[in-house]
Amino acid sequence: MKEFQEIFLRYHALLQAAVYGSAVLLILIGLYAVLMKKHLVKIVIGLSIIESGVNLLFVAVGYISNHTAPIFSPGYEHAADKMVDPVPQALVLTAIVIGFATTALALSLVIRLYRHHKTANIEQLKSLRW
Amino acid sequence: MLKKIFVWFLLAVLGIALYASFGRAPFGENRVGPTDNPATVSAFYLKNSAEKLQTANSVTAIVVNFRGFDTLGEVTVLFLAATGLASILYRKEDEDEEGEHLPVRINLPASSIVRTGAKILFPLILLLGIYIFVHGHLTPGGGFQGGSVIATGFLLMFITYRRFGTNHKVMVWLESLSGLAFVLTGLYGLIKYGSFLQNTPDVGHLNDLVSGGLIPLIYIFIGIKVSTELTNVLDTLMNIKPKKR
């Protein structure tokens, strides 16, 4: 445990860069897919990747170094001062469920469009152009 | 070409801006503050979920008790998404079939290893899901997580046995009744204690299975509702009918 804390302190800047960097990278990858890809399913996948990035960012902001999960399990009944922030975790729980709902709805719209136009390529969906 | 340059420029600007703004919130910094005399909302939740509500998992305490109304809205969104999915994908039997080249669903049976494994795993997955949402106030997890686990068990059965189907009527009734039970629990708090979704003062003792007042009850309702809803979504998506031959 002590060694872990030392390693944590020594590589703290690196860890911050890794966690925030990967979250931002996920958001950018998703945004790239949304903006550049032609296939509707790939666009929906891009939206889902953005969502994962935002969720990761949220939980990372709520983290406190050397603190434990916000659960008062036996042995931790009075350790409220040693727990990470529970609010981002609760918000992310909500966000994941809503994300599932929106992804399912988006995919159903994609299926409907595919059925109607026989293609899911946005360049060939002429009636959506303006 | 111009679009590509524009997109890369946009991504670069956004990436630098996002990273720089979150660089100001150092990773691992204590932003909660002391919990004895809470100055932030997080500290308040941490203090009261143990002392006042006797709920071990403070994330559950926030989701079901402190922000219970929010969760009711969330469950409604999930319900609307499931209903919307079914209504968007609805197709009448005699509807004019245009999808001439829609791929026909593969009707080959799964191998006997997969079938036997699925048969053994299915009840265990259901048990795990039920365990997760019954213990939502004690251990990591809860209604949404347990419901998703149960839905994965049904997905395993759907993709293993092509003819496996759920009893639609039972699922719809379970879903509606658990949603209704959630609202009725809220109304019970309104009538008895004066505010919607108010918890009972009789909250038991920390880390008991029956503790936290109405929290485990509500999370069980949410678990049933989420599992039936997700199973219905999967059922709808698996039963998209290809053109009849």
Image (tube, rainbow, N blue to C red):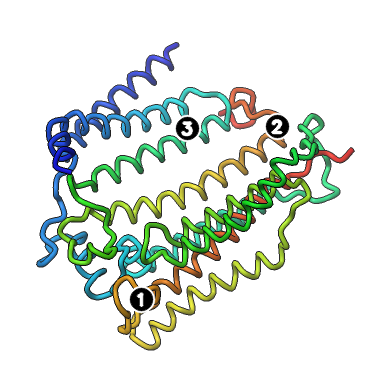
- Residue at 77% x, 32% y: name it: B102
Of helix, strand and loop, which one carries label 3? helix
Task: Residue B53 in the image: state x and y as whole percent.
Answer: 28, 74
Q: Residues within 10 Å of mark 1 (few under 14, many from 20)?
A: many
Of helix, strand and loop, which one carries label 1? loop
**For the N terminus of chain B, which image quadrant?**
top left
Task: Residue B144 in the image: state x and y as whole percent.
Answer: 47, 58
- Please give the residue where the numbered disc 1 appears in the rendered image: B211
Q: Which mark is residue A46?
A: 3
Q: Which mark is residue B188?
A: none
Quadrant location of residue A87?
bottom left
* Mark 3 belongs to chain: A
Are both tags, 1 and 3, on one chain?
A: no
Compare residues A129 and B11 and report the one nearer the observer.
Answer: B11
- Residue at 29% x, 73% y: name it: B206
Question: Would residue A106 be found to the left or right of residue A24 on screen?
Answer: right
In contact (CB < 8 Å): disc 3 and disc 2: no
Up the image or down, A112 lies above or below B14; here it is below
Q: Amino acid at mark 2?
A: His
* Mark 2 belongs to chain: A
Question: Given this view, does label 1 or label 3 mark the residue nearer the observer?
Answer: 1
Q: Residues within 10 Å of mark 3 (few under 14, many from 20)?
A: many
Task: Residue B132 in the image: state x and y as whole percent.
Answer: 46, 60
Of helix, strand and loop, which one carries label 2? helix
C-alpha separation, residue under disc 1 versus residue under disc 3: 42 Å
Residue, far right: B245
- Please give the residue where the numbered disc 2 appears in the rendered image: A117
C-alpha separation, residue under disc 2 versus residue under disc 1: 55 Å
**For the C terminus of chain B, which image quadrant?**
top right
